[in-house]
């Protein structure tokens, strides 16, 4: 049936951190996680999966000021379904791949609000359900594919979207959604934003230490490992 695996109900300012949830439902409304319409929920470092792209929703994003970061959402009818009037919400550095629809904006989209940054959206039957709704407060460095009928959302001065292929992932067919290399279109291609987390889904530093060379924010929930370990500790000598 159409059950919900994880929900904050009517609780405001609730945090989900580090869970995995699977919607095993054969209903289109079975949901991995639903945030509260009361707002202020935080969802980070989550993995949400399903059993078929014909069933289920990864995340139902409800509530003003809700923050969703560093999540992997795959194998569902809808990766993300936005709720109405999510003022000030943040959906950033998530990887939404291999779903029926990646980002599904509610109803007509007229009441979809929030900010969308650095999301790797790829390999869904439909990556973005509609053009960026007029009420979206900001969007940049989200991805799509060449030939998409609906472009990845880009809203605001200087905002851009990014076109990617399966080769930009370490092993897309094998379920390894890290950037393939420093040549990947995901690498250092993101934008910085208020509220960015300092580590990725795997616990690696963001941005990743690059031994004195330039460091940027990657797109998606995984940061490419430059191979130099964490940033060295700093000391002040007096």
Image (cartoon, grey):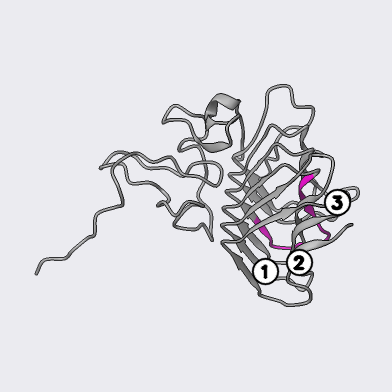
Relative to 233, is 72 above or below? above
Callout 1 secondary element? loop
Residue appearing at x 50%, y 50% in the figure: 192
Tell me which numbered mark, 1 or 3, is placed earlier along the sequence.
Answer: 1
Q: Position of residue 177 (x, y in %)?
A: 55, 38
* Relative to 31, residue 149 above or below: above
According to the image, label 1 marks what residue? 41
Local secondary structure at mark 3:
loop
For image coordinates 73% across by 32% down, the residue present is 151
Q: Are marks 2 and 1 in contact (CB under 8 Å)?
A: yes
Viewer-closest of 92 and 125: 125
Residue in view at x 47 percent, y 35 percent? 187
Query: Which of marks 3 and 2 precedes in the sequence?
Result: 2
- Left or right, 228 with respect to 200, comes to left
Image location (x, y in percent) of residue 62: 77, 63
Closer to the camera in the image, 20 or 69: 20
Which numbered disc covers residue 106?
Answer: 3
x, y percent for residue 81 = 79, 51
First-in-chain label (2 vs 1) = 1
| Residue 193 percent location from the top left of the image | 53, 54
In the rendered structure, find residue 174 and report the number of the disc placed on it.
Answer: none
Q: Residues within 10 Å of mark 2 (few under 14, many from 20)?
A: many
Label 1 CA crowd tier, 10 Å (few <14, some 14–19, many 20+): many
The magenta segment is: 78-90
In the rendered image, residue 84 lying in the magenta stretch gets the answer yes
């Amino acid at each position: 049936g159409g059950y919900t695996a994880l929900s904050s109900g009517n609780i405001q300012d609730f945090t989900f951190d580090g869970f995995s949830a699977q919607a095993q439902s054969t209903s289109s409304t079975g949901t991995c996680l639903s945030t509260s319409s009361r707002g202020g929920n935080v969802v980070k470092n989550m993995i949400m999966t399903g059993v078929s792209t014909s069933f289920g929703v990864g995340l139902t994003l409800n509530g003003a000021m809700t923050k969703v970061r560093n999540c992997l959402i795959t194998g569902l009818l809808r990766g993300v379904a936005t709720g109405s009037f999510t003022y000030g919400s943040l959906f950033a550095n998530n990887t939404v791949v291999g779903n029926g629809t990646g980002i599904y904006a509610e109803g007509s989209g007229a009441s979809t609000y929030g900010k969308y940054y650095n999301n790797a959206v790829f390999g869904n039957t439909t990556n973005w359900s509609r053009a960026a709704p007029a009420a979206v407060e900001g969007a940049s460095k989200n991805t799509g594919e060449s030939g998409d009928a609906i472009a990845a959302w880009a809203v605001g001065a200087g905002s851009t979207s990014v076109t990617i292929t399966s080769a930009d992932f370490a092993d897309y067919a094998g379920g390894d959604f890290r950037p393939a290399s420093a040549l990947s279109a995901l690498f250092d291609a993101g934008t910085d934003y208020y509220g960015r987390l300092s580590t990725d889904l795997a616990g690696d530093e963001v941005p990743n230490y690059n031994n004195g060379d330039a460091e940027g924010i990657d797109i998606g929930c995984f940061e490419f490992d430059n191979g130099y370990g964490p940033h060295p500790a700093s000391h002040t000598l007096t």
